[in-house]
Amino acid sequence: DENVTVAELSQAMGIPVNELIKKLMHLGVMATINQEIDADTAMVLAAEWDISVDVTKSFTAEELLAEDAEDIEEDMIIRPPVVTVMGHVDHGKTSLLDSIRHTDVIASEAGGITQHIGAYQVEVQGKKITFLDTPGHEAFTAMRARGAKVTDIAILVVAADDGVMPQTIEAINHAKAAEVPIIVAINKIDKPDATPDRVKQELTEHGLVVEEWGGETIAVPVSAKTGQNLDQLLEMVLLVAEVQDLKANPNRTAHGTVIEAKLDKGRGPVATVLVARGTLNVGDAITAGTSSGKVRAMIDDRGRRVKKAGPSMPVEVLGLSDVPHAGDTFAVVDDEKLFKQVIAERMAKRREEDHRRTSKVSLDDLFKQI
Ligand code: GTP
Ligand code: MG
């Protein structure tokens, strides 16, 4: 039995019955308060109030959490670290990323890169590193707020001529809260008024004691402008990543996180996603936040069309129905029927719970508990 009554749905959604009935009439369904409606109709209704977000998300989380346990050690292979570059305004995050990108032979060979997808991969000593370009901390915050842990390592950029500033401290706190190791890049050391030692001193006040002073914080003095010590910085990233022993199973349906998304005039909704595990393929049916669809095309960080994206690989995905939010999880839905069944199952389960419940609960609350 996959049906739910209008009254039950009203309670779960926190939307008055008469409003639901009105909306149903609009959809051509004449319903009364005790009328049973099917799961599909319930989903359409939920979507009208934007509640489908939670439906989709909980499905994703639930299914994937359950699936996650199934990964056995033999299936796990090394994946590239995902590195987020953070720091105060104008301290050189973008410059650093640009510079690092130029050290990547493949990138410079491709030439004339116009595409900027906010996430890209470079290859250092035959090993890939994924970088996330997060202007401000909004994306990072959004992702953390949604419980997505995408970052393995944070590079904290501090300008040597400016020192630790409010957003530097914010970044430190974000990284600490997320339990992400921090590598400090003391930038702009080419400047005559650069005082790297002052930066180190200020960092100490925020719990980051550099190695040379007996602490554990790796700090590399660099210049995004001249490229000085960038190789050393990248080496440190690889070193930290090695210790973390980052692995994922590429041989399963993909799931991951939306890094950013936009509505493109010509191409429709475009989402930059980062695959956490599994492999995303063109043609896969996916859900991402409020939207769903079939992957029509995928484009890598160099503007090339790709057919597959494995763990830690960022790609632009075309083919979604709507623009998802940064931090939304995406997941491949193998089977649309199954997807609907899960929703229906939950409706049934929720109904049971409703009987035991007196206070009003949101659809979101209910789905979270299941
Ligand atoms: P927001 O995105 O606004 O937060 O800034 P950002 O951290 O990305 O800084 P951005 O890379 O835009 O650099 C800010 C300014 O610092 C630019 O004028 C850069 O040219 C300059 N800059 C960045 N790195 C260096 C460096 O290593 N040396 C010198 N001399 N200037 C640098
Ligand atoms: Mg920038």
Image (cartoon, rainbow, N blue to C red):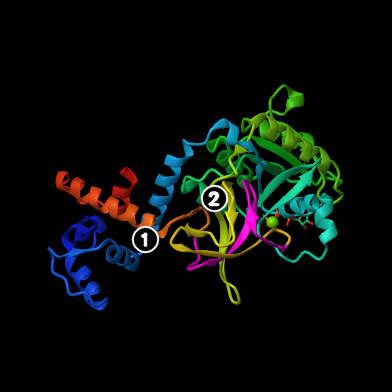
- Asked if residue 259 shows in the view, the reply is yes
Q: Give whichever of 193, 134 is nearer the camera.
A: 134
Which residue in the protein does label 2 denote?
254
Query: Percent x, y for residue 268?
Result: 55, 72
Which image quadrant is residue 83 in? Answer: top right
Q: Amino acid at mark 2?
A: Ala
Q: Give whichever of 19, 77 is nearer the camera.
A: 77
The numbered mark, 1 or 2, whose residue comes first in the sequence reads 1
- Asked if residue 160 shows in the view, the reply is no
Tell me the tag on residue 52. 1
Crowding around mark 2 (Cα neighbors within 10 Å: few <14, some 14 to 19, many 20+) is many
Q: Quadrant of ligand 1?
A: bottom right
Query: Percent x, y for residue 246?
Result: 63, 35
Q: Residue at x 80, y 56 (%)?
A: 107
Left or right of residue 164, residue 343 in this image: left
Query: Percent x, y for residue 196?
Result: 79, 37
The relative height of residue 85 versus residue 23 in the rendered view (above or below) is above
Mark 2, secondary structure of its residue: loop
Q: Is mark 1 within 8 Å of ligand 1?
A: no
Quadrant placement of the N terminus: bottom left
Q: Which residues are magenta?
A: 303-324
Mark 1, secondary structure of its residue: helix
Q: Residue at x 79, y 42 (%)?
A: 126
Residue 312 among those drawn in magenta? yes
Which image quadrant is residue 297 in? Answer: bottom right
Q: Give whichever of 289, 296 is nearer the camera.
A: 296
Residue 329 among those drawn in magenta? no
The relative height of residue 50 versus residue 105 in the rendered view (above or below) is below
Quadrant placement of the C terminus: top left
